Image: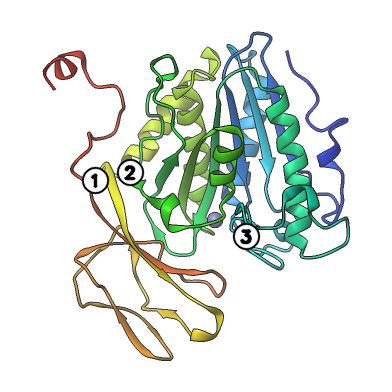
Amino acid sequence: MREPITEGVPGARDGGAPGIERVLGRIKAREAGPTVLLLGGIHGNETAGVEGIRRVVDELERADALPHGDVFALLGNRRAYLHDRRFVDVDLNRIWKPSDPPYERLPAEGEGAAEFQEQRELLEELTMIFGEVRGPVHVLDLHTTSGEGAPFQGEFGASREPEEEWERGIPVPHVLGLESMIRGTLGAFLHRRWRARYVLFEGGQHRDPRSPLRAEAAIWTFLASIGLVPSSLEDRVTSSHRLLDDETRGLPDVLEMIHRHPIFPDQGFEMQPGFLNFQSVRRGQILARNKAGTIRAEFDARILMPLYQEVGSDGFFLVRDHHAVRPRGLRRPETERATS
Ligand SMILES: [Zn+2]
């Protein structure tokens, strides 16, 4: 059973970004089940995720009905997306702190920062979705980075209840501790407010033609891990696994965040050219410069998300391989499970 994508959905009105719809997809099975909520364009210049979502939603709408459950998809920052910018006034993915303006008192239409309008509209849409869900909610938030390199994911709010056990879906490295480094994200809010499981996918460089393919592959593997892919589309899952496996070959399965280098607008921060996601760096190596001088790595580590664009509040992150947890895949083979 399918319903029209935007008809009658208040959040899909034009508001401050004419012609750009908030609701990218709304697909409901007859039978109740888990919900997947796909988010793209929380940063307006990160269009690959939106493209990936459009492709998947299009296929799902043309295919057999979902086995059960619901798939919703939303565009995050419509105003910034319209202008191909990370944000218009403030970063939409940093303003969901409990201390920020209470959501009930967000500025009215036409008042305050563009992102507070976005936040109000998005919240309206999210409230409707969470009022409608018929099972556990799994959010997949699709981003891209200004630097190049392999895709990865971060996750929080994962429930480990046995009845909710899911295959760990997206076959790319997991970076632990991302949520503790960045404040005010939408993901943290979704978990706080609705106890949703939240997965962040970073799909490569903003303009890399492969980034939309990676985003699409992440969505298929994620949906499959929650049992929301119609059997007629199983081959999409297989090819997506292959694509992401190929792109992350040789990388550790789990890494942990050990350092964030925050930056401020007047510091003149400039990353040394040429760093890729997951590239190894040595303690003492020059990573960037600012007005005060050089910025060196404090640890032997791997670099993540080096900033190669004008806008942003994180210069780079350092991660290290994490050995204390099992590699990819929550579900271990039975033999292994019995002995460990
Ligand atoms: Zn982003």
Q: Tell me the residue that label 3 is attached to.
A: 45
Q: Earlier in the sequence, mark 3 or mark 1?
A: 3
**Which residue is rendered at x = 38% and y = 23% of the image?**
167
Assess whether mark 2 and mark 3 are in contact (beta carbons under 8 angstroms). no
Residue 279: image location, x then y, percent: 27, 62
Side of 198 where 170 appears, left or right: left
Q: Which of marks 3 and 2 is nearer the N terminus?
A: 3
Q: What element carries label 2?
A: loop
**Which residue is rendered at x = 58% and y = 11% of the image?**
67
Q: Alpha-carbon neighbours of circle 3 within 10 Å: few (<14), some, or many (≥20)?
A: many
Q: Tell me the residue that label 2 is attached to.
A: 173
Of residues 302 and 115, the one drawn nearer to the viewer in this rendering: 115
Residue 52: image location, x then y, percent: 58, 41
Residue 106: image location, x then y, percent: 79, 54
Assess whether mark 1 and mark 2 are in contact (beta carbons under 8 angstroms). yes
Q: How far apart are marks 3 and 1 (CA)?
A: 29 Å
Q: Specify the amino acid type for callout 3.
A: Asn
Q: Which of marks 2 and 1 is nearer the N terminus?
A: 2
Q: How far apart are marks 3 and 2 (CA)?
A: 24 Å
Residue 192: image location, x then y, percent: 56, 40
Side of 80 where 244 appears, left or right: left
Of residues 333 and 260, the one drawn nearer to the viewer in this rendering: 260
Q: In which quarter of the image is residue 237?
A: top left
**Which residue is rendered at x = 24% and y = 72% of the image?**
298
Q: Is mark 1 on a helix, strand or loop?
A: loop
Of residues 221 and 121, the one drawn nearer to the viewer in this rendering: 121
Q: Tell me the residue that label 1 is attached to.
A: 252
